Image: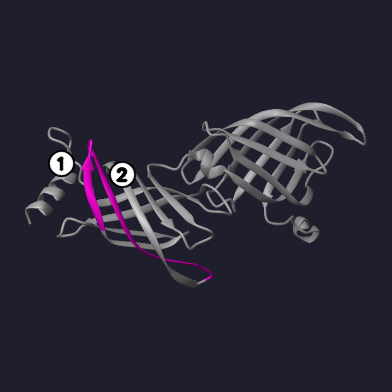
Amino acid sequence: MMSVAALLMACDKGETGSKPIDFAGSYNGYTLASCTYFQNKISPKEIIVITKNTDGTASVSFTSATWGEFTIADAQTRVNGGICTLSGSGQTQMGMNGNTSIYDCTFTAEIRSQDDARMEFKIPAVMGGMTILFRTGEAPADLVLAGTCKGYTDADCKVFQDRYTDGESVTLTANGNGSVKVVFKSVSWGTFTVDSATATREGDEYLFAGSGSVAMGMGESTNNYDFTLSGRTNASKDDFSIAFHVPAVMGGLTVTLLPGTAPTASAVTE
């Protein structure tokens, strides 16, 4: 009884004279998932709930729309240097298309406050060993933007309007400094590259902008032209608009990538 009370008090108060650490509550943040097949796949707006048990351990609950349900019933708690650490094991329900299976998992956490915590779930039997890292706070815009937007392009200029091309894509890569590298390779329009586009969040959308130079022409004869980039997308990259504007080409050429497939001739007429 005495040792359990002392352990609980240690995680609540930390070291003598330090600010109390109350680990119980809801933690808001994002996750980065890694395994043999991919690295740092991000999921924003995740929530982990930790509850104090009467015996001094902690109950951890994590329900993710992306990764499933995780339950740790009795994680051990201890304090060191003003940091409350938790560790334990439990189970997770994971699957695809409504088919789920139960897997063993382990859990560790380092908590300084409700707004400053790092937690990790490891699932050895999933995809060669999966690790899901949770961090409090807002997901960095560059990490959310990383990935590929696929759809069709709409090209417009003074010479023509609504020239559509299906099967186009733009790839965004996080540079690790808050910016993203943007690459658009098009058989019709050339290769557009922005090495360091700014990345910001505005509501539920993520915005990026930058500039570069593109080689355009006919046949083997090409010239380099300056262009500007402006793009927006949601976190899942199924609602986006990415525009490349080349002022010096055909009175001002704009090539815009949009989701889905190009409108049919009848749809355009209507």
Residue 261 quadrant: bottom right
Q: Earlier in the sequence, mark 1 or mark 2?
A: 1
Image: magenta residue range: 75-97
Q: Residue at x 77, y 37 (%)?
A: 191
Marks 1 and 2 sit apart, C-alpha to C-alpha, by 15 Å
Q: Nearer the viewer, residue 250 or 61?
A: 61
Q: Residue at x 91, y 35 (%)?
A: 218
Q: Secondary structure at mark 1?
A: helix
Evaluate whether residue 24 shows in this view. no
12 left or right of 163? left
Name the residue tied to disc 2: 110
Residue in the picture at 74% in, 46% down: 154
With 226 as the anchor, is 110 left or right in this view? left
Task: Give 198 or 74, whichever is nearer the viewer.
Answer: 74
Residue 95 part of the magenta-drawn span: yes
The residue under the point 78% across, 56% down is 269
- The residue carrying mark 1 is 13
